[in-house]
């Protein structure tokens, strides 16, 4: 199993890139892919063109609120496992798991310790796990807590964006999540990078892996609510993602 | 006590100690007392003398002290007219043997060339590896702790044929045991037999050739001594702890193959000190009564085809592998495998089709062992992608079978079926869900194999309870629906029985230390009538979690002697809590809010605290944001109660605990409640009314104040005085 985590501030197009990366993997590597939508504003399923089932967050809440009327003779481990396995959206090209909203007040030690085990085991079934994270990396640090083979931090082509990407990368270091490689990807690049951006990249000491150009076709499909998944394979952005993924040599 | 074994072991010990003395004297004369001795790349000095005696031997001269200890322990050889020698003498002789072994082996490491290849695997014709270095120790020792490897078989001597040697080695490997080989007899050893058959050996394959000398057996016991020091927290010299750790945690035994001479008897006596029994293929007599080892100490003669299973039985080792007759690989490694939709041949039950699984006890004559029936289509009679209903009905019979075991056995069907490669099983009872992969189907897996798995595993794991198992598998909707109500009725009855389970009815409670990450000294004690304070964990969950992960955060705690039945104090619980709280909590009361109450991590759903002037208590739920009559809001109260400190007058607990018969029962129970926040009070209304009726205070619910009538202690007192709350006339809390 290889884990690719995609992170970035909101609005950088990270979920769109996640969708394109998943598509590239399924077309070129394997269809044994677990896509994990770890952003609480769940939308990866829309980009991938699949319906959403229950989220992990909702399951966790249900378990907490229903705790006294769960069957007494059935363990919560089994109940939770069953629900999570059921919540998986199964497509021909990948499976999708949505983490949903973060926890509310109350004690989640037990629920999270169960979740961690179940998710780790589930992830082990796939050749690739692609995690679309929210900026704070909440899910990485507390839920899945597995090693990341490749961290891709997405930014727009601005100095401030690159600084924010650097911050995310450092945050992960503090969370003590083991990370193999880490790369920066600039998204929606239009023309040459400015000197400020170039110097910001140097300052953050993040290797720039790829520049993904602005793609009108993608923007258009986004406006019309057409899943990124179905956008033509020769679109500029998808071609750039393809080149990038090949260079990653996974 | 076998006179024969004792005599031979003691005689062997004398021979080995004499040999150690001879060799030590010679090498001292040759090389001098300051010559360094060590097992290469180890940080533990010589493991036995360090672990057992606390010695830090670094030179040949230092070995003299060890020799003196060995001589001190040597008992006289029993005379011919002593018919019942003591086990104690034999054990001492065994320990003296181990010291002598260590001296002899240590001296070998001063030889040039080294008689051992100090590496991970044999190569270039160098078979014998000698002592394990620290890298091996760290990598492999941990497997003894997390149960990846339950233990080892120290194999001494040789087998009648190479084929038998290979078969025994394979059988031990299949059970995840390490095979430590040493002590050739007449120049023949099991390791050489394996080498002749081209079997790959070394730490990686778990087939470890230590040395051909009988004294090389010490490297097996040295290894387990170091496991106790490194992972068991034993201090060097604390021999009791080293030995007890090995007895309790390292499932090792000695297989004596072929003729057993005096020296090998002496090794066996040494191993018994660690709780490791010896199983022999020749007739060397037996030591059966229980003393040091869990069951027998020495068993012989045992035929080769049964020697491994006998050893496992005698050592009390529970290994979950029995040969399951199915055409796909089977083992714990396949648990957690999901059969993805793309790879799936058929889906059974789940949300779209009805299903259930049910296990029930029957009379012996009603069950035909290994009878497996499939009613409805088999997997090869349905097209790919089919969805079918599924009922699995298991009848078991056994002399020791009880209705209480039914749910325990039934819950395991999930684990069992998941162990088959290509089978995905979720849930239990009437929310079961199964998938079979295309690959499994192509390899010949059929629905009837569910029955084969269940039959084999129930026998394998519950052999003490179960004598006969028959399984019916239904894949026709009508057949499933015809039976589902019977099963559901049984589930309901079981739930009711469990709900009615009392603390007095069980011998063990479960600990929960999941929250120690942020409240390091906090220990939850979960009893049938008191769930974990987070509300998530009940007694059954603790029990199940322990079964899944025996070394995890939930441990069974034997109640042992009752100290105070009213306050809820037990000797076993106190001892456990004392240790698990890092020696901060010597006494613990399960049912009292005043006297050594249970601590809290910070996860509690509710806080109860005493309102002194009312002679009662208030209960507040964690989402209540307002002020409480204690003068503190929930958040401030939480600071007082949490962090693993005992604060008399304050406890954190789950919501459901309020409805338990054991809710602060030492102080009179729920009748003490004078205030609750309204939401909580309303949620628990049915329970409060039930408790009121039981206690003869029909209107208890109405007597309890909430924030709409009282927010200060004075107002609560005024309210309950006006209403005539029973707390006012109860004995004083302090």
Image (cartoon, rainbow, N blue to C red):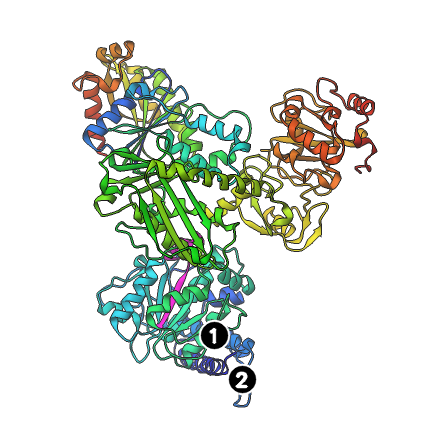
Q: Secondary structure at mark 2?
A: loop
**Left or right of B571 in this view: B129:** left
Residue B534 appears left or right of B125: right
Q: How many marks?
A: 2
Magenta span contains residue B27:
no
**Which residue is rendered at x = 44% and y = 79% of the image?**
B285
Residue at the location (66% across, 26% down)? B685
> Which mark lies nearer to you, 2 or 1?
1
* A124 is higher (above) or lower (below) than B564: above
Identify whether B159 is placed above or below B237.
below
Quickly name the residue at label 2: B76
Q: Report the Cα–Cα distance between label 2 and label 1.
A: 15 Å
Is residue A164 among what the camera can see?
Answer: yes
Position of the C terminus of chain B by quadrant: top right
Q: Which residue ends up furthest to the bottom in the rendered image?
A: B81
In this rendered view, identify the residue nearer to me: B494 or B142.
B494
Pinpoint the chain carrying mark 1.
B
The part of the chain drawn in magenta is B135-156
Residue B46 visible in the picture: no
From the top left corner, tell me how far across and down residue B582 is, in percent. 60, 47
Residue B33, placed above or below residue B549: below
Indicate left or right for A39 with B692 as reference: left
In percent of width and height, residue B657 lies at 63, 35
* First in sequence: mark 2 vs mark 1: 2
Frontmost residue, B125 versus B23 = B125
In which image quadrant can residue B631 be found? Answer: top right
Q: Position of residue B257 (x, y in %)?
A: 35, 74
The residue that mark 1 highlights is B269
């Amino acid at each position: 199993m290889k884990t690719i985590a995609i992170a970035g501030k909101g609005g950088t197009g990270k979920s769109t890139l996640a969708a394109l990366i998943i598509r590239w993997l399924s077309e070129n590597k394997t269809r044994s892919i677990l896509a994990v939508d770890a952003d609480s504003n769940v939308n990866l399923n829309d980009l991938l063109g699949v319906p959403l089932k229950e989220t992990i967050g909702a399951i966790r809440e249900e378990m907490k609120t229903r705790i006294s009327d769960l069957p007494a003779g059935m363990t919560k481990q089994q109940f939770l496992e069953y629900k999570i396995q059921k919540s998986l959206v199964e497509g021909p090209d990948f499976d999708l798991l949505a983490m949903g909203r973060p926890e509310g007040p109350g004690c989640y030690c037990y629920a999270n310790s169960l979740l961690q085990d179940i998710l780790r085991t589930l992830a082990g079934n796939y050749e690739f796990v692609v995690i679309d994270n929210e900026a704070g990396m909440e899910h990485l640090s507390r839920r899945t807590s597995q090693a990341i083979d490749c961290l891709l931090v997405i930014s727009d082509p601005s100095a401030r964006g690159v600084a924010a990407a650097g911050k995310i990368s450092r945050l992960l270091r503090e969370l003590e999540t083991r990370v193999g490689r880490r790369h920066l990807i600039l998204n929606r690049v239009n023309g040459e990078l400015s000197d400020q951006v170039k110097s910001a990249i140097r300052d953050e000491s993040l290797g720039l892996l790829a520049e993904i150009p602005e793609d009108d076709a993608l923007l258009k499909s986004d406006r019309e609510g057409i899943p990124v998944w179905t956008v033509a394979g020769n679109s500029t952005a998808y071609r750039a993602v393809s080149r990038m993924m090949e260079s990653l040599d996974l | 006590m076998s006179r024969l074994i004792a005599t031979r072991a003691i005689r062997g010990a004398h021979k080995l100690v004499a040999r150690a003395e001879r060799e030590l004297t010679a090498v001292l004369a040759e090389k001098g007392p300051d010559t360094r001795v060590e097992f290469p790349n180890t940080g533990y000095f010589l493991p036995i003398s360090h672990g057992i005696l606390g010695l830090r031997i670094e030179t040949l001269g230092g070995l003299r002290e060890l020799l003196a200890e060995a001589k001190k322990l040597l008992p006289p050889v029993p005379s011919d007219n002593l018919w019942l020698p003591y086990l104690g003498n034999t054990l001492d002789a065994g320990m003296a043997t181990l010291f002598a072994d260590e001296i002899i082996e240590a001296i070998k490491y001063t030889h040039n060339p080294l008689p051992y290849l100090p590496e991970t695997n044999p190569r270039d014709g160098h078979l014998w590896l000698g002592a394990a270095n620290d890298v091996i120790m760290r990598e492999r020792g941990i497997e003894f702790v997390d149960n990846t490897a339950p233990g080892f078989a120290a194999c001494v001597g040789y087998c009648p044929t190479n084929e038998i040697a290979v078969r025994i080695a394979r059988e031990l490997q299949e059970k995840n045991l390490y095979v430590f080989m040493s002590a050739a007899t007449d120049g023949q050893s099991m390791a050489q037999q394996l080498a002749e058959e081209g079997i790959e050996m070394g730490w990686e394959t778990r087939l470890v050739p230590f040395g051909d000398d009988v004294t090389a057996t010490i490297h097996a016991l040295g290894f387990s001594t170091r496991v106790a020091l490194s992972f068991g927290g034993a201090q060097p010299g604390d021999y009791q702890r080293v030995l007890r750790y090995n007895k309790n945690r390292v499932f090792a035994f000695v297989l004596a193959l072929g003729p057993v001479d005096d020296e090998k008897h002496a090794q066996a006596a040494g191993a018994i000190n660690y709780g490791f029994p010896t199983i022999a293929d020749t007739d060397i007599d037996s030591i059966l009564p229980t003393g040091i080892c869990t069951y027998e100490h020495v068993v012989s003669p045992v035929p080769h085809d049964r020697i491994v299973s006998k050893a496992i039985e005698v050592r009390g080792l529970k290994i979950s592998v029995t040969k399951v007759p199915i055409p796909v690989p089977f083992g714990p490694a396949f648990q957690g495998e999901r059969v993805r939709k793309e790879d799936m041949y058929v889906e059974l039950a789940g949300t779209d089709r009805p299903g259930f699984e049910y296990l029930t006890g029957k009379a012996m004559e009603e069950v035909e062992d290994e009878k497996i029936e499939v009613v409805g289509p088999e997997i090869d009679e349905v097209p790919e992608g089919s969805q079918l209903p599924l009922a699995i009905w298991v009848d078991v019979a056994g002399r020791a079978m009880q209705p209480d075991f039914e749910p325990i056995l039934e819950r395991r069907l999930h684990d069992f079926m998941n162990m088959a490669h290509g089978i995905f099983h979720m849930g239990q009872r009437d929310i079961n869900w199964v998938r079979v992969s295309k690959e499994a189907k192509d390899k010949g897996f059929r629905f009837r194999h569910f029955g084969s798995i269940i039959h084999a595993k129930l026998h394998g794991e519950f052999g003490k309870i179960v004598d006969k198992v028959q399984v019916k598998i239904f894949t026709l909707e009508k057949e499933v629906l015809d039976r589902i109500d019977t099963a559901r009725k049984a589930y309901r009855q079981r739930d009711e029985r469990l709900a009615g389970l009392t603390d007095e009815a069980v011998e063990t409670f479960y600990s929960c230390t999941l929250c120690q990450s942020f409240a390091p000294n906090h220990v939850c004690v979960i009893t049938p009538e008191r769930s974990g304070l987070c509300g998530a964990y009940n007694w059954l969950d603790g029990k199940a979690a322990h079964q899944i992960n025996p070394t995890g955060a939930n441990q069974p705690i034997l109640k042992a002697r009752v100290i105070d039945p009213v306050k809820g104090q037990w000797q076993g619980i106190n001892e456990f809590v004392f240790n698990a709280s890092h020696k901060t909590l010597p006494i613990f009361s399960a049912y009292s809010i005043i006297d050594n109450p249970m601590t809290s991590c910070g996860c509690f759903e509710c806080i109860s605290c005493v309102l002194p002037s009312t002679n009662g208590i208030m209960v507040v739920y964690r989402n209540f944001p307002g002020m409480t009559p204690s003068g503190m809001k929930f958040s401030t109260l939480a600071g007082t109660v949490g962090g693993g400190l005992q604060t008399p007058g304050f406890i954190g607990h789950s919501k459901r605990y309020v409805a338990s018969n054991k809710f602060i029962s030492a102080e009179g129970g729920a009748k003490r409640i004078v205030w609750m926040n309204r939401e909580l009070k309303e949620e628990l209304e049915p329970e409060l009314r039930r408790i009121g009726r039981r206690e003869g205070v029909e209107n208890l619910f109405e007597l309890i104040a909430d924030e709409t009538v009282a927010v200060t202690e004075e107002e609560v007192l005024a309210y309950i005085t006006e209403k005539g709350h029973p707390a006012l006339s109860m004995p004083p809390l302090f």
